[in-house]
Amino acid sequence: MTTDGALARLIRSSADRTAAAAAEACDLCAAPVPDGHPHLYDTGQDEVRCVCGPCSVLFAQGGAGGGQCRLVPRRRIRLPRVDTAVLGVPVGLVFFVPRVDGAVTAQGPSPAGAMRWEVDAAAWQRLAGTCPQLASVEPEVEALLVNTVHGLDHHWIVPIDDCYRMVALVRREWRGLSGGGRVWPAVERFFEDLTERP
């Protein structure tokens, strides 16, 4: 299972922000949606869907959709340094998503989209024991987002749509075999622009 569907949607919507904002519509009722609109995460399709405010109310607290579609939270929490090396993923730009069944996946961006690895669930539980905020990560729809590339030290709990935006950014800006000169400054700007939200 890949995140290509969600990735394709975010690449399309970020290609031209002005035109996309005018054209975006709720995936449920087709009403126009503004910038900053809510998202649903479809666990069956592994895809992020745009939703208007009124439709999003249907999915608050696990409402409609039989549990397959879940409202993506908006909170962002900047964490102190988290020792993710214990999770065994040798990548500096990665996000970790706990699943409802207790599994944990790690996903990292690449020129072709997101790469995915399974993470030892017991190792995740041990890490959560050293950083209590990780125990509050909502399965499927929130993630631990990490960037330690080029000496940076970013650790965030973010909504899953932020992670997909980051993957889309890397895919869009990557040039050649090593990424070129645009991708890493763009990733640094992405992290600089993250703001904490309750």
Image: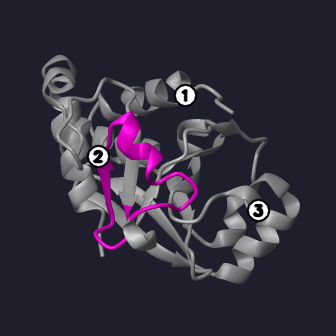
Q: Which quadrant of the structure image shows residue 171?
A: top left
Look at label 2 and name its amino acid. Ser
- How far apart in space, not on screen, are marks 2 and 3 (Cα)? 35 Å
Question: Residue 178, which numbered label?
Answer: 2
Front in this rendered view, residue 3 or 29? 29
Residue 12 coordinates in the image, percent (x, y) = 15, 39
Res 172 quadrant in image: top left
The quarter of the rendered structure image containing the N terminus is: bottom left
Q: In the image, is residue 100 above or below residue 194?
A: below
Type of the residue with mark 1: Leu
Could one spot residue 81 in this view of the protein?
Answer: yes
Residue located beneath label 1 in the image: 194
Indicate the secondary structure of the residue bearing disc 1.
Answer: loop
Q: Does the magenta-highlighted stretch encompass residue 61?
A: yes
**Residue visible at 33% across and 24% down in the picture:** 35
Residue 135, disc: 3
Q: Could you say whether the residue bearing mark 3 is in a helix, strand or loop?
A: helix
Give the image quarter of residue 89. bottom right
Q: Earlier in the sequence, mark 2 or mark 3?
A: 3
Which of 126/6 is in front?
6
The stretch drawn in magenta includes residue 194? no
Q: Give neighbour class at mark 2: few <14, some 14-19, many 20+ (Cα, 10 Å).
A: few
Residue at horizontal 48 percent and vertical 29 percent from the top: 188
- Residue furthest to the top in view is 18
The image position of residue 137, as x and y in percent, is 66, 57
Chain part drawn in magenta: 42-64
Where does the C terminus fall, quadrant-wise?
Answer: top right
Q: Which three-letter amino acid code belongs to the residue tagged 3? A: Ala
| Mark 2 residue element | loop
